[in-house]
Amino acid sequence: MASQPKSPQSRYTADRLIPGAFEGETVTRRRFMTGTAHAAGAIAAASFVLPTLAFAIGPIFKETEHRWEVAGPQDLFNEYNYVPVDVTVTPGIGEIGRTTIYVRKHNDKIDTDKYDENTPYIAITSRCAHLGCSVRWVDAAKRFICPCHGGVYNLLGERVAGPPVRPLDRFFTRVNKEGLVEIGPRFSVNSELRRFSPRDPGEPIDGIGQYLYPSRPSVRI
Ligand code: FES
C-alpha cells in the first residue's frame, strides 16, 4: 500500500506524519521539552550572572560627587615647597574619606607645561600611582617618596624611580571670592602631564594604556 504523501507545509505534527502526534499539535513533544530545558537553563544562569555583572559594572556608572573644599588662605602656600592639607576625597563616610594632599603655588618657572594653564595652585595627591600607598613629600630631597616599593616622584609629581606607572594624580584648584584656595575634583595625568579623568593606581595612561584602562564614564574632569 502506497504511503500517504508527506505535507511539509502543514503546521500540525499529525499532518507531517510525526509518530505519536496528537490532533491539533503544532510542536513536537521532543522540541517542546528541549526548549523548556534551554529556557530553564537560561533563567538559572541569568539569576547569578546578572547580579554579578551589576555588582562589577554598577560602580562604573555611579555619579561621582564633585565638590570644592577650602584648603586655606593664599599666603599659606608658596611656590617652592608643598604644604600638606587634609581634604575629603570620598564624601559621606566621615574621617575615612579624608586624605592628605600636597599644595603649592603655581610657579611659572617650574610649571611650564601647557596643561597647567588656569591652575593657580598645584595640588598633588598623596596616593601612590603604583598600588596606592601614601607618599610623603621630603623637602630636603625635593621628592615624593613612597615607602612601600621605593616609588620616587619629582617636584612635579613625575615618576623618577620605582614601579609607579604614571605621575601622581592632581586636583583642580581655584581661589574663591573670599580669597581662599579651594581644592576641586581629582584628575590623572600622563607622563606629559596631560589631563585625564581619574584612574586607579596601577593604571597607566600613556599610549595604549589610556584605552586599556578607560575612565569611568560618569567621572568628569
Ligand atoms: S605603592 Fe608606591 S611604589 Fe608601590
Image (cartoon, rainbow, N blue to C red):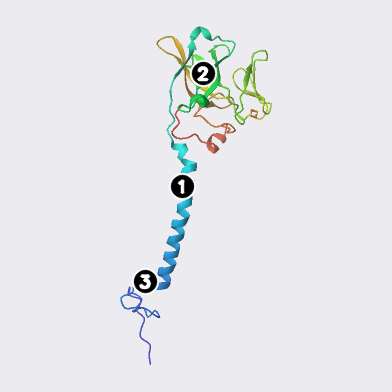
- What residue is disc 2 on? 116
Q: In this view, which residue lies farthest toward the top? A: 75
Real-space Cα separation, disc 3 to disc 2, in angstroms: 70 Å
Q: Secondary structure at mark 1?
A: helix
Q: Earlier in the sequence, mark 3 or mark 2?
A: 3
Q: Residue at x 55, y 38 (%)?
A: 212
Residue 149 x, y percent position in the rendering: 68, 29
The Cα–Cα distance between marks 2 and 1, rounded to whole angstroms, is 42 Å
Does residue 135 appear to the left or right of 62 in the view shown? Answer: right
Read off the residue under disc 1.
51
Amino acid on which disc 1 is placed: Pro
> Residue 11 at x, y = what percent?
33, 73
For marks 2 and 1, the one nearer the N-term is 1
Check disc 2 and report its element: helix, strand or loop.
helix
**Residue 95 image position (x, y, % from top left):** 51, 24
Mark 3 / mark 1, whichever is N-terminal: 3
Q: Quadrant of the N terminus?
A: bottom left
